[in-house]
Image: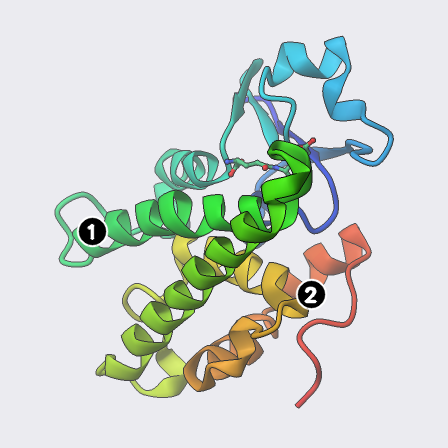
Amino acid sequence: MDQPYTLYYAPGTASLAVHWMLVEANLPFQAIPVDLAAGAQHTATYRQLNPTGRVPTLVIDGEARSESAALLMLLAERHPDRALMPAVNAPDRALWLEMMIYLANTLLPAMRDWFYADTDGLADGAAAVRDLARRRIESAWDQLNARLQASDHAMQDQYLVGTTLTTVDFLAVMLMRWARDMPHPATSWPYLEVYVQRLTKLSSFQEVCRREGLTGWPRVQ
Ligand SMILES: N[C@@H](CCC(=O)N[C@@H](CS)C(=O)NCC(=O)O)C(=O)O
């Protein structure tokens, strides 16, 4: 039998999407907190698991793996019965791949720049980095909002891919949460606001927030 997964996480960070998916899919796992403020991600022990010194790390059958988007896709692939991605050759498969890569490749790095401009780069250039990051993030909200607006599906059936929950939604909602204190939070876009309000009512989202001690988002309508 496969071993339970081990998730190394820090509340509200890039590990949240993976944590949420493990809860939603009802998969066996243990969650180990990594104290980022104390620098636990930089210890030799943690870097053996994840040489990038970041969360999340997911130990799968004894092997440590990283990168939130890759972990979501890998879990979806390992548990096809949970139906959290369109099957290979299904009509929405290409869109699913496109959206996962868009979020991981465009939005996630811009978020990193927004939050880490001062420490990843030179403090002198941080304001310019943050300004570009904000533009990229807001342009992504434009794109996602337009996608939902153009969807043929009724608002109550709207997911970013098709009419059922997929890994794209775990990643997208996590990223939208990160923007909550930005000058223009994702929820200022009308279709994203409806989407966030709906998705965050899922019991699995509420449960992962309870486990990670996350409160206050989204604001109650
Ligand atoms: N591309 C990575 C990004 C991971 C990442 O940047 N994690 C942040 C938290 S959101 C982290 O571990 N920060 C600690 C640090 O950089 O020291 C992923 O998606 O997993």
Q: Residue at position x 32%, y 45% from top?
A: 101
Rounded to the nearest angstrom, the CA distance separating label 1 from label 2 is: 28 Å
Left or right: where does residue 178 sit relative to residue 188? right
Q: Is residue 13 above or below residue 74?
A: below
The colouring scheme, among rainbow, by chain, secondary structure or one colour, is: rainbow
Instruction: Compare residues 101 and 200 and report the one nearer the observer.
Output: 101
Q: Quadrant of ligand 1?
A: top right
The type of residue carrying mark 2 is: Gln
Numbered tag placed on residue 1 in the rendering = none
Q: Residue 44, percent across and down?
A: 74, 9
The type of residue carrying mark 1 is: Arg
Q: Residue 39, percent across and down?
A: 81, 26
Point out the image quarter for the C terminus. bottom right
Residue 21 appears anywhere in the view: no
Left or right: where does residue 101 sit relative to residue 90? right
| Quadrant assignment, res 126 | top right
Instruction: Compare residues 188 and 221 and report the one nearer the observer.
Output: 188
Instruction: Compare residues 212 and 117 and report the one nearer the observer.
Output: 117
Q: Which residue is mark 1?
A: 93
Residue 22 appears anywhere in the view: yes
Say which element carries label 2: helix
Numbered tag placed on residue 206 in the rendering = 2
Q: Is residue 28 above or below residue 90?
A: above
Q: Residue 40, percent across and down?
A: 80, 24
Left or right: where does residue 189 sit relative to residue 118? left
Q: Residue at position x 58%, y 21% from top?
A: 52
Say which element carries label 1: helix
| Quadrant assignment, res 214 | bottom right
Q: Residue at position x 62%, y 28% from top?
A: 4
Q: Residue at position x 67%, y 14% from top?
A: 47
Q: Is residue 74 above or below residue 109?
A: above
Local packing at callout 1 (Cα closer than 10 Å; few below 14, some 14-19, many 20+) is: some
